[in-house]
Amino acid sequence: MDAAPTRKSVRTTCAYCGVGCGILATPRGDGGVAIAGDPEHPANFGRLCSKGSALGETLGLESRLLHPLHHGVRTDWDTALDLVADRFSRTIAEHGPDSVAFYVSGQILTEDYYVANKLMKGFVGSANIDTNSRLCMASSVAGHRRAFGSDTVPGTYEDLELADLVVLVGSNLAWCHPVIHQRLAAAKAARPAMKVVLIDPRRTATAEIADLHLPIASDGDTSLFAGLLHHLADVGAIDRAYVAAHTSGLDAALDTAAQLDIPTVAAATGLAPADIRRFYELFAAAGKTVTVYSQGVNQSVSGTDKVNAIINVHLATGRIGRPGMGPFSITGQPNAMGGREVGGMANMLAAHMAIENETERDIVRRFWNAPKLAEKPGLKAVEMFDAVASGTIKAIWIIGTNPVVSMPDADRVARALAACPFVVVSDVVARTDTMKYAQVALPAAAWGEKDGTVTNSERRISRQRAFLPLPGEARPDWWMICEVARRMGAGSAFDYPGPAAIFDEHARLSGFENDGRRDFDIGGLAGLGAAGYDALGPVQWPRPAVKVEGGTVSVPHPAFPSADDTRFFADGGFFHADGRARFVPMPAVRRVPEDDAAESLTTTPLDAAARSAGHLTLNTGRGRDHWHTMTRTGLSARLSAHIAEPYAELHPADAARLGLGDADLVRIVSPRGAVVVRLLVSDRQRLGSVFVPMHWTGDTSSDGRIDALVSSAVDPVSGQPGLKATPVTVSRFEAAWYGFAVTAERPPTAGLDYFALARAERGWRLEMAGLVTLDDPARLAERLSGVSAGAILAYRDDAGGAHRFAAFAGERLVAALYFSRSPVAVSRGWAAAQLAGAHPSPARTRLLAGRGGADRPDPGAIVCSCFSVGINEIAGAIASGRAISVEAVGELLKAGTNCGSCRSEIAGIVAGVAPEVVPNIVTGDASQRTA
Ligand code: SF4
């Protein structure tokens, strides 16, 4: 294998989002790793967000799977691999190739993806390999292919900085792609004439840089952009020359958009006509325009139409492929794009070739020497787990992902896996909700231990490099897939000495019989050899090989005149057979309910009576400092301090209507399941909808797996599920008692009606509640702390129903526990910090008070993770007049001066005036107010 652990600084790429930031990782002598942004990487130029900055805090081995397991019992690699190969081979022999499946991940590297796809499509002979990227950006892929004839992102990040108008659709850039948000914010600050429009049901942190926020009804985007196309034609803003030379279908698209005058669009989107007009006028007048979209567009049962409605207006105005212009899909995962490139989706072939295309199948068949190559698309993610549930799929290998948390109708996925005859899970982490169903568990190498490449949202391929040794018996994903392939009889096709050889084959396939007919061509990166691969810097595709005297050289695509310009489509050159792009006509408009309550236009409409009974539209998404199911970010106390508990955001009018208040616990129910989460009342939330993040699992919460509630209805073109528009009811969780604890050891949570568990510095923090009166709080304190009563200091207030405990081992605090009949009002951050340091007997009563003295006021919910600055500190500085701007807050408190991820929230606090913020922090950190 190629991994070469070292103590020098290593250039690598962030493990989290699709921005793909370059990182300098420097192993320290003490076993830790210093993390810094790579100033030379063109995605981030040295910047990192809070998640990237904290990568060094997530490299410990305590949660790792370090050895192969069979039914939970340690085994050796040979036995495990033989077993996997044997069960897959026998299942295929008895039930055919479509009786097995791989479910993979945008977290794995391109080389891992390449061999997984090659094994399933080329040598098993099924296309049943799909990926969690199906949940992320499949609608963008489908929209690109409909419009362009290829899955091509035309532009680059620089275009956002060069544009006159940036339109952000369904994209909370400030939290989900923070470094791109920082680049955009800096460009706007330097050029204030630039306009930013945010189209999002929620007034997210991203709204702080927006000139106009359109709080659109769920799934209203298609009508909004179809109406814009109509408006552009009306005001003569169509680029007739571009349309005539490079596209087809405009007239049909305009015909279907003809009904969309502004009042009709207002009825379909829930937006004010004046706001729609302003947006349309801004778009028509702007020269350079970029429209950025992500999960708010893709995660919809009409996601592909939304993508094409956006692309339509860029084609109509010719604003595509030139500096500062283009539709721009930004991906969630670090290697969603790499997975697309190798064909790691059930409906694609390798190297952006089409599985439906016989010519392209033949190219791949001959290149791989794979006579059994799959002839038809396989099952997409939702269909795949349906087939597991029905027994059609009898063996599945899940690689680097946690579908029991992240798939829609997640409880059904769990039941399907429980009944599946053979489940293999390869992962970095030992305790995931999915791992519980693994008959064979394979320990995978983690970020920092593996070598390969990833591709970011602007088509830039970057290296991930190993800087740590492989722990225990962990192995890279590509290695275990190749070992299984060898045992299944396909050895010679999987005989790679390392990832460099896999990348070389991937590059050669992309250029094989291509000649500019296919967008994805990195043939110029073939033949690098191990040393060239090791030294490979960030490079945007396409990079075809060009024949010159004495060999070939890597150059930009022949269609591009400048070596620095890899944008697509400025001069046409689309990948449909006639070289033209396609306008896609939009379907007929459907209206939102007249009372303006948000409701999916594609699910069953809720009537007013249903809404008054508590029905709302559930929108799911992400928090700022966590990633996916928290298997990495959850290891960092600093990141966990931002929002340490699953929560639901609800508009104040909806909360009042339902008799709910800030910091209540609420139960959210759909026909598929229920969660219990903390309520955050916020006027950033659209009336009629409720937002819940997707990060919490069965390991970190009692009932926080929000995707268990979500319908598995999918977009008919892309197969992507609609994760943002599920009808639900919301009601109070009638707790008889509430509790909060900090503990040095992970506390036992079994039997708690409600809990949420998060890391703290040197321990854990635990929120709890119970449905029946807590008869014996002292006994619960003993159980949670692991300390007997004799070493526990206790306080009780019978009138107020409060019980407080502090447990010690010598002078060390082992646990502080607080129980009450109402939500516990203690300073969470202060209490967690007391786990460090000595507590001699005379000073212990302060621990029972649950907050520092008057000289140490409660900092409140953490806003700045880098410097642990709380909302009360920021609000106090503003209220006192010592800081009246984001910059002044930074100078005074350092908040926002490192990674910058919290600058939007600080701007919101500055704009919101402190007194409106502070009274809501009734329970401390659970009540983050600013997003
Ligand atoms: Fe990583 Fe943050 Fe950059 Fe995304 S924006 S790649 S999470 S550092």
Image (cartoon, rainbow, N blue to C red):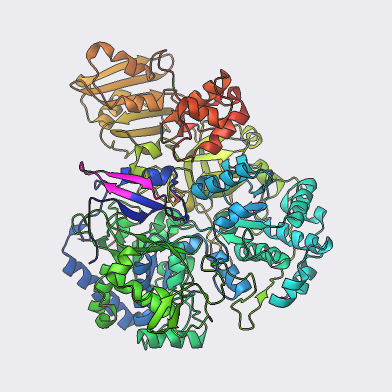
Boundaries of the magenta span: 25-42
Q: Nearer the viewer, residue 343 or 69?
A: 343
Reply yes or no: does residue 35 show up in magenta.
yes
- Residue 844: horizontal and vertical position, in percent? 28, 15
Q: Nearer the viewer, residue 526 or 624?
A: 526
Looking at the rendered image, the quarter that the C terminus falls into is: top right
From where the camera sits, is residue 776 visible?
Answer: no
- Residue 430: horizontal and vertical position, in percent? 27, 53
Q: Nearer the viewer, residue 223 or 405?
A: 223
Q: Quadrant of residue 834?
A: top left
Q: Quadrant of residue 153?
A: bottom right
Relative placement, left or right, of 257 versus 309 is right
Q: Quadrant of residue 700?
A: top left
- Residue 824: horizontal and vertical position, in percent? 43, 25
- Residue 315: horizontal and vertical position, in percent? 69, 68
From where the camera sits, is residue 574 visible?
Answer: yes
